[in-house]
Image (tube, grey):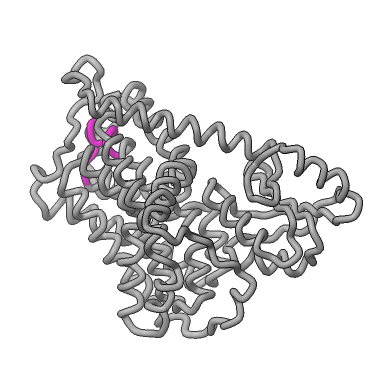
Amino acid sequence: MAIVNAMSPYVLLGFLVAGLLHVFVRPEVMARHLAGGGWKPVVKAALFGIPLPLCSCGVLPAAVALRRRGASKGAATSFLIATPQTGVDSIAATYSLLGLPFAIIRPIAALFGAAAGGMAVDRADRDGATDPGAFEAEKAEEMPRTFGGKLLEAVRYGLVDMVASVGKWLVIGLVVAALITVFVPDELFVRLSAYPVIAMLLMVLVAVPMYVCATGSIPIALSLMLKGLTPGVAFVLLMAGPAANFASVMVIGRAMGRKATAVYVGSVVLTALVFGMIIDYLLPASWFLPAVTSLDPACHHGLGIFETLCSGLLAGLLIYAAVRSRRHKGHSHCTCGDACSCATCDNNSKNDTEMIPTNTYKIDGMACAHCRMTVEKALSALPGAQEVRVDLSKGTATVTGSVEKAVVEKAVLLAGFSFGGVLPG
């Protein structure tokens, strides 16, 4: 409860800012600034990506979309590196738990690593011109026209869609932090703290393959520091954990090529290690004392009313996201785009089932609600698609309508995911 109360006001604020970015900063505008060679598009891509609260799987479709809309390969790689490491929500939560120096250095490290990685990709791989018609079938996302409508959409996206995307990994991070605090002996980390470089290398081996979002990694880093590990080791987890995992590496390899993938992973690891060593060896240790100094429930200083209300609201949003996700698995989408079982949709389904073809496709690389929404949006925009149902747990997409397999495959690949073919049935 101490961690949740410390984080919840900042996390909610970050979600709201994420909604504002989603509504008022359009991908087409971003792509226009990211085309061409040189260092400017690469740095711009990193600056665009740092405040966006997307996880390492959610950023993949966005980066592929930017690439297809004209962004250079270096700029797309820079965006891939910077975006999952930070985000307005994670920066705010970092400040609330780990303090201001961590919150400042985290985006600086993301900018440095993303810029270096993007420029390295441009030097190593100068081929692969963008197909100008690659996104001709993509339907532009409709936004409210009035300012009040846009604000409501920003709140809805931030407190519903973003919570659904990040919430699961935030809860996992809190649970892991609690388990580390209770069950891991202090002596283990005290011994490792005497060898920071070895501890950082071990942290890389653990952090790179696993999946944890930028916000979910914060309580884990806090618990490790309170157990005795150095701030530099915790920083390695903060930077390497959210940015790379096996699923994202596979998708990036398919979309960007082997050279870009190798640079991507190398930039993430090298930046985390360099800045971790800078924190431990060059900067004052007093800067990196965590804002929350104990996870012992017996040592709390009371629960503030505002913080507790924020925690209750966050818990309610997480529960709603979980219930909404379960309902989505059990219902198809009607023509209006909402999960329902209305009589009109039922009658249309009964009358048209025998006439309209329905196929189920295997989609690899989906890992969160944001991935599901991206695939669903891409397939729903295809001409002839009347109904689309994406099952995240099974990794499938069911398309009702006269849509050819090749068209579905192209849409899935352009969205940043792997196409596994038609499933029997």
> As displayed, is residue 71 above or below residue 389?
below
Tell me: 318 left or right of 289: right
Is 135 situated above or below 151?
below
Decide: is 149 above or below 292. below
- Rendering coords of residue 400 (x, y %): 78, 54
Q: Residue at x 15, y 49 (%)?
A: 101
Give the answer, above or below, for where 373 lies relative to 129: above
The percent coordinates of residue 323 (x first, y second) are 56, 31
Relative to 386, 243 lies left or right? left
Q: Residue at 50% x, 54% y: name it.
A: 57
Q: Is residue 64 one of those drawn in magenta?
A: no
Q: Does the magenta stretch include residue 224?
A: yes
Residue 43 versus residue 151: which sits nearer the camera?
A: 151
Q: Looking at the rendering, in which quadrant would you find the N terminus?
A: top left
Residue 37 figure quarter: bottom left
Residue 199, image x and y in percent? Answer: 30, 44
The part of the chain drawn in magenta is 221-231
For the residue pair 283 and 346, the one nearer the viewer reads as 346
Determine if residue 250 is in view.
Answer: yes
Give the percent coordinates (x, y) of residue 127: 51, 85
What secondary structure characterizes most of the magenta part? helix
Q: Is residue 211 visible?
A: no
User: Horizontally, is 121 left or right of 233 in the view?
Assistant: right
Residue at the limit of the structure toward the top, as seen here: 298
